[in-house]
């Protein structure tokens, strides 16, 4: 698949125009499948647990690299429909500036009626794929960024991905995208320090959620100890949520 680098809006409008030529969703699904088949071959070395997108019914592997502050994506899936869906996202976001990817309003999904024609499990998988891509855009380092570098496959990224597996049972968004983690660091001895909060002091998982974060981090092979501090100041607010979380909760 040849992917020309033009802006996100133009990529979305092209997709909307292409789908407008089909009269029913049987033809649209066939086109989605064809897009998936046209994806470039996925490097087998990235078909690992680390690169799996959590929350998808099918297996989806997603790899990202940064060059000149742009995000370059590759992916694969074990089902043809899901592979076509991730192909659509890659077509829109591949080669775009990190900030543009993270802030992208992916309106084409609703315009072509994709989300409305997916099963609930596939719809959740679509949200997970978007969340994963935007997380890459947020946390992979821009070359002119003075912030600490978070290399793909590094301890920091592994910790973030582990925390992204933790959900408040009442909210279908992981606690990282909710903005509940205020700080996350690891020293040379493998000791992790975490500062986090909850959506409310009356949160029903006030005891279990911090414990789950500690247990998941301790399960990482390079972590020897976890010191977690639960704070209420500054208080959590909806403004701390990422765009991914806002999209998942329809709060835009």
Image (spheres, rainbow, N blue to C red):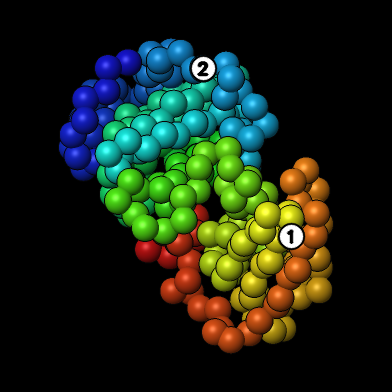
Q: Is residue 55 left or right of residue 67?
A: right
Residue at the image position 44 percent from the left and 74 percent from the top: 239
In the rendered image, which residue does mark 2 sit on? 43
Query: Residue 77 appears in which quarter of the rendering?
Result: top right
Left/right of residue 164 with respect to residue 208 in the rendered view? left
Quarter containing the C terminus? bottom left
| Residue for point 77% across, 63% down | 226
* Relative height, residue 65 to residue 189 (above, below): above
| Residue that sits furthest to the front in the current view | 188
The image position of residue 111, as x and y in percent, is 30, 42
Residue displayed at 48% across by 26% down: 75
Q: Which residue is more in the foreground, 193 or 230?
A: 193
| Residue 140 shown left or right of residue 179 in the figure | left
Count of numbered badges drawn on the protein: 2
Quarter-wise, where is residue 71 in the image?
A: top left
Q: Callout 1: helix, strand or loop?
A: strand
Q: Residues within 10 Å of mark 1 (few under 14, many from 20)?
A: some
Q: Residue at point 51% right, 17% down?
A: 43
As drawn, 242 above or below 222: below
- What residue did someone put label 1 on? 191
Q: Give the x, y percent position of residue 15.
A: 26, 30
Outermost residue, bottom direction?
Answer: 233
Disc 2 secondary structure class = loop
Mark in the foreground, 1 or 2? 1
Compared to residue 181, the image places residue 11 above or below, namely above
Q: Position of residue 217 (x, y in %)?
A: 74, 54
* Location of residue 13 in the rendering, given as x and y in whole percent from the top left corner: 20, 36
Which residue occupies the foreground of this view, 160 or 122? 160
């Amino acid at each position: 698949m040849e992917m020309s680098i033009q802006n996100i809006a133009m990529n979305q409008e092209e997709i909307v125009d292409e789908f407008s030529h089909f009269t029913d969703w049987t033809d649209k699904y066939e086109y989605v499948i064809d897009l998936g088949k046209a994806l470039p071959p996925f490097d087998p070395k990235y078909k690992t647990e680390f690169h799996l997108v959590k929350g998808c019914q099918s297996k989806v592997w997603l790899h990202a690299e940064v060059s000149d502050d742009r995000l370059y994506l590759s992916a694969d899936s074990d089902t043809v429909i899901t592979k076509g869906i991730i192909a659509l996202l890659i077509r829109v976001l591949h080669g775009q500036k990190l900030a543009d990817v993270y802030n992208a309003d992916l309106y084409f999904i609703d315009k072509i009626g994709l989300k409305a024609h997916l099963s609930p499990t596939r719809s959740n998988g679509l949200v997970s794929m978007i969340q994963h891509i935007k997380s890459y855009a947020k946390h992979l380092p821009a070359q002119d960024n003075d912030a600490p570098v978070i290399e793909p496959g590094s301890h920091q990224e592994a910790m973030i991905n582990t925390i992204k597996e933790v959900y408040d049972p009442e909210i279908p968004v992981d606690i990282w995208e909710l903005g509940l983690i205020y700080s996350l660091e690891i020293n040379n001895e493998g000791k992790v320090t975490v500062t986090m909060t909850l959506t409310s002091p009356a949160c029903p998982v006030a005891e279990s959620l911090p414990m789950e974060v500690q247990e998941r981090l301790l399960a990482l092979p390079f972590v020897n100890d976890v010191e977690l501090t639960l704070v209420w100041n500054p208080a959590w607010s909806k403004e701390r949520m990422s765009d991914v979380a806002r999209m998942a909760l329809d709060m835009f």
